Image (cartoon, rainbow, N blue to C red):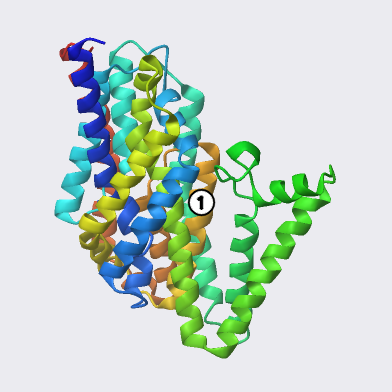
Amino acid sequence: MEPTVIGLFLVAGLASLFMSWVIGAGSSGATPFAPAVGANAISTMRAAFIVGIFGFTGAVVQGANVSKAVGRGLVGGTSLPASGVIVVLFIGAGLMTIGIKTGYPIATAFTVTGSVVGVGLALGGTPVWSKYLQVSAVWVLTPFVGGGLAYGIASILPRNDVAERHSVAGLAGLVGAVLANLEFAYLGPGKTAATVTGVVKQTLDTESTMVPAVVSIGVGVSVASLVWFDIRRDLTGGLRRVLLVLGSLVAFSAGGSQVGLAVGPLLPLLDELGMVSVTAVLIGGGIGILAGSWTGAPRMIKSLARDYSSLGPRRSIAALVPSFLIAQVAVLLGVPVSFNEIVVSAIIGSGAAVGGGEAVSVRKILVTVGAWVGSLALALVVGYVTAFILPMS
């Protein structure tokens, strides 16, 4: 391998590591526990520590789908060269750094997707319209679905005719049933990806379609019963523990989705060189997210927790449940999605359910949405112009 190629490969790897650090310091590290910090259920520094651990785990066991979509599914007919990968990652990381410094949550998915498409099209690639439609649908629907679900949940939790030990336990049971059907790497035979329901079905050596349903219901009922008993015994402590578990699950989901934005652009380059496995790349990206969460996330956590809405434990739970569900749908579809968009939309929905417009900073919401749209357009244009002007190798 020529020294120039080796040098470019190393620079691309460092750019990917830097991007993963920025993700950990920004969207992945800040958003999952922002509602919990806002509800005074956990301190900012402890939240940053926990989210780093779960973000790393999610990156390793659930990061492959989005990584492959970002690296191979956004532009057809061409692969990004090493210099193109470097441009993509530095554009995305640069815009994210601006967001971290200013306290506004720039959407990582928008910046990386825009720069990948811009660079790829400038190099002669063709648009993958079917993927663009899928990605656009998730991006557009997320605020309405996430905010709407959060609004509905937050409207039910404080009702006098619905005891919280029932309503919160029911939500926890739903999350448990979903977990039983999520696909995790290394869970199946030969360290392949599999679901808990699939493993049980294979262990029983049966083709019955009832097994997954029975397992899902069993897991859901077990989780709901545990939460019901905990809240009945200690209402305040029980709600706090539910909130912290949900935050951990959202952090896990963030790692599984966001790592692809950092390491996905590397995959075509690694395919060409035939050097490193996807698992090794995911571990490297997970380490970067872990480091970013521990060192850079507290600023963004404070910004999201304090500025968007004044949340208590109930509204925080209402924000985290739809955040977890939407994040896992995105991981399943292999769609790069912004955790800023997911959690901020849910925070707004849950805050509006109880506090109305006074519970949400309208000005900051408008500025944030403008930053999302502007970062996508800017990343696409800068990526295209850079790749068009500079020689790419």
Q: Nearer the viewer, residue 250 or 199?
A: 199
| Left or right: 173 in relation to 86 | right
Residue at 64% across / 47% down in the picture?
Answer: 195
Decide: is 174 above or below 384.
below
Decide: is 381 above or below 42.
above
| Left or right: 213 in relation to 58 | right
The quarter of the image holding the C terminus is top left
- Residue at the front extreme, as displayed: 190
| Left or right: 155 in relation to 312 | right
Residue at 84% across / 42% down in the picture?
Answer: 207
User: Could you tell me which secondary element the residue under label 1 belongs to?
Assistant: helix
In the rendering, at what x and y percent does residue 375 appear? 25, 39
In the rendering, at what x and y percent does residue 184 appear? 56, 46
Q: Name the residue under label 1.
A: 326
Quadrant in the picture for residue 303? bottom left
In the rendering, at what x and y percent does residue 386 appear? 18, 20
Q: Nearer the viewer, residue 101 or 48?
A: 48
